[in-house]
Amino acid sequence: MNKKHHHHHHHHHRARKWFIFKIVLGVVAFLLITIAVIAYGIYRNVENSYQNSYVASTQGTPTVNISNLHAMSILILETGDASTNANCYASVLAVMNKDTKQMALVSIPVDTQLSNQTTINQSFVKNGEAGAQNLVQNLFGLQVTKYVQVDVTKIGNLVTAVGGITVENSAAFTSGTYQFAQGQVTLNSAAQTQAFLQAGQAETSERVMKVSLAVYQKIKANTSVKSLANLSYYQNIMNAFSSAIHTNIAFDEFQDIALNYNKALVNSKKLSLNTTTKNSVKTIVPTDLTTVKTSLAQMLK
């Protein structure tokens, strides 16, 4: 009975984590496309801001020119403070093909032992993005083309930039000097958002999902009513975006993705990696890994 209950809870937790990261991925993709579109009007301004997000490839993560590719993979990591290699909360590999106009998404559990008895979180804490990327490449037997790191401690800057958001809070709690009532909560400042996200580690991922979705909806709503002439609004979003996102996707590549992979970005399928626990050690179910590896290889053809 206990075993079944544990399995069900684990499945629910995994499903929730997947949903959270699909939303975060959607927000990133939406921002990429939105900014690429408005870039025609404020190209230089945006390009200068984007440089703050751009991180040149380090040793162990070779530079790849995506313009020559018909398919590519992007590793997306949701982490704590990007400057300190704090914990990695979630990881998703997105594999997209511009010919088939499809994208496959696989959520990789960060606390699960992979091929060399190391977890993604342990690799990230020890060796940063390059460590996590090498682990994922070894796991699936493919090359990770690019990466995007989302610093959850900076999401509050995006909230401020869009003019505040409203989210649903499942239970009342206090965080620092802030009190959050049950029900609808309005977040206006970066500090308030940070307090909302950080209280209680178990709830952080769920709150990141809610905040990300609300930011996405606010930008979407404002894009239709705010004139593109209101450049300061988009510039503020771009500045906040560049503080929260760290990536080795260069500005021209990012335009390439928005232009050539936009249909793939909205045509996604989920590939599942279930885990099993034995002697308190979590590992990926071997048959799942085989299935996912085959699917990803097919997508990259």
Image (tube, grey):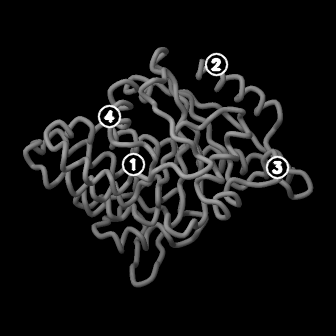
Marks 1 and 4 sit apart, C-alpha to C-alpha, by 23 Å
Crowd band around label 3 with a 10 angstrom C-alpha radius: few (<14), some (14–19), many (20+) = few
Observer-side mark, 1 or 4, equals: 4
Q: Residue at x 66, y 54 (%)?
A: 131
Classify residue 95 as left or right of residue 135.
Answer: left
Q: Tally the numbered discs.
A: 4
The residue beneath circle 2 is 298
Observer-side mark, 2 or 4, equals: 4
The residue beneath circle 1 is 213
Classify residue 114 as left or right of residue 242.
Answer: right
Marks 1 and 2 sit apart, C-alpha to C-alpha, by 31 Å
Q: Residue at x 49, y 68 (%)?
A: 83
The residue beneath circle 4 is 255
Percent from the top left, x then y, of residue 263?
39, 23
Classify residue 55 as left or right of residue 296.
Answer: left
Residues marked 3 and 2 touching at CB (< 8 Å):
no
Q: Residue at x 21, y 40 (%)?
A: 39
Percent from the top left, x then y, of residue 237?
26, 54
Q: Looking at this rendering, what residue extends furthest in the right direction?
A: 279
The residue beneath circle 3 is 116
Name the N-terminal-most of marks 3 and 2.
3
Crowd band around label 1 with a 10 angstrom C-alpha radius: few (<14), some (14–19), many (20+) = some
Name the N-terminal-most of marks 1 and 2.
1
Name the N-terminal-most of marks 2 and 4.
4
Which residue type carries mark 1?
Answer: Leu
Marks 3 and 4 sit apart, C-alpha to C-alpha, by 37 Å
